[in-house]
Amino acid sequence: MTARRVALVLVAVVVTGAGAVAAAGVDWGSAPAADTPDLPAATAEVTRQTLVERTVAGGEVDFGAGTPVRSTLPGTVTALPAVGSVIRRGAALYRVDDQPVVLLYGPMPAYRALAAGVSGADVTQFERNLEALGYTGFTVDDEYTSATAAAVADWQQDVGLPDTGRVEPGRLHYAPGPVRVDTVRAAPGDVAGSEILTHTGVTRVVTVDLDVSEQRLAPVGAPVTVTLPDGRTVDGTVTAARTVVTPAQGEAEPTTTVAVTIGVKDQKALGGDSAVRVAFTAAERPDVLTVPVGALLALSEGGYGVEVVDARSTRLVPVETGLFADGRVEISGQGLAEGLTVGTVS
């Protein structure tokens, strides 16, 4: 039965329902009510946008995992820094036999003695630090020359070492930059040669443990969004990701996770140590047509469609679906365009 026919039947019932209807003012000459199109109660617009699917994981704001420092010098530990103290280039990280183990900056660990006639990338790294500390009279290159040795002797006098012009193994410790002492493992009087302390960077980072299957979410350099406890968000960047194997304990199976470190430039907004939520980009579809998920209609023949709404009518348009994210879905198909109005759930 059409909508128009239903309306006529209802009028007939009212007319024949009582003899006094005419006296009540029924207008027998009025035209029948106009058809009312069967339009959806709620609508939405087809938009063109970049659709991003995100995976959210819990994280912690802290100074990151500590890097262990082990002494390779013979002798006795005589002085140690306080936990939380910041050590910068040229300063003593700790002391053995009352002589300093000096912090310098660089990615390559110290692994051998440096003396005249030695060459290599470790020489270049050391000479760059020597120059940064204000020593001159040598060329920064990969050759440890007599000029380098003379500058080293000056440096040794300044830091309280014998001015031999030769740097013995274990006298230097390299880090990417200034360090914060995280834990102290040794005590004055201990024999050097074991773990002395651990250090971190001096800026807070966000650390997240991901399942190995989610490692693809965190390539170095990937942007992330960090949601703070008060609901504010800050931008972050993945700076490191390493695999961590936890050995079996008792009846528990060994586990493997990916420890992700995220750098945040806005340290003030990041605040102190806290629990946060981190959104990683799982998938991204740029410049696609999207509608709310509630606009999808299941078709009897299979697949999905959307109900395109005109001024006085609707039509069903089959669509192919793509990425689902943030309550919207990517759609494609004939007759679709940005700005169309479609029916959706209210």
Image (cartoon, helix red, strand yellow):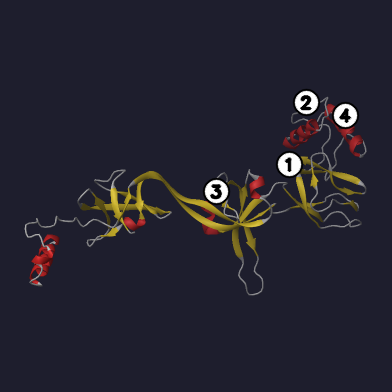
- Few, some or many residues within 10 Å of mark 3 (<14, 14–19, 20+): many
**From the viewer's perspective, is the residue at label 4 or at label 3 nearer?**
3
The image quadrant of residue 26 is bottom left
- Secondary element under disc 4, as helix, strand or loop, is helix
Q: Position of residue 310 (x, y in %)?
A: 23, 48
Q: Which residue is tagged 4? A: 150
Q: Residue 163 versus residue 307: which sits nearer the camera?
A: 307
Amino acid marked by disc 4: Ala
Q: Are marks 1 and 3 in contact (CB under 8 Å)?
A: no
What's the amino acid at mark 3? Val
Q: Which residue is mark 2?
A: 139
Q: CA distance from mark 2 to mark 1?
A: 23 Å
Among numbered discs 4 and 1, the one appearing first in the sequence: 4
**Number of numbered discs on residues:** 4
Q: Are marks 2 and 4 in contact (CB under 8 Å)?
A: no
Q: Quadrant of residue 147?
A: top right
Q: Quadrant of the N terminus?
A: bottom left
Dot 3 or dot 2: first in sequence order is 2
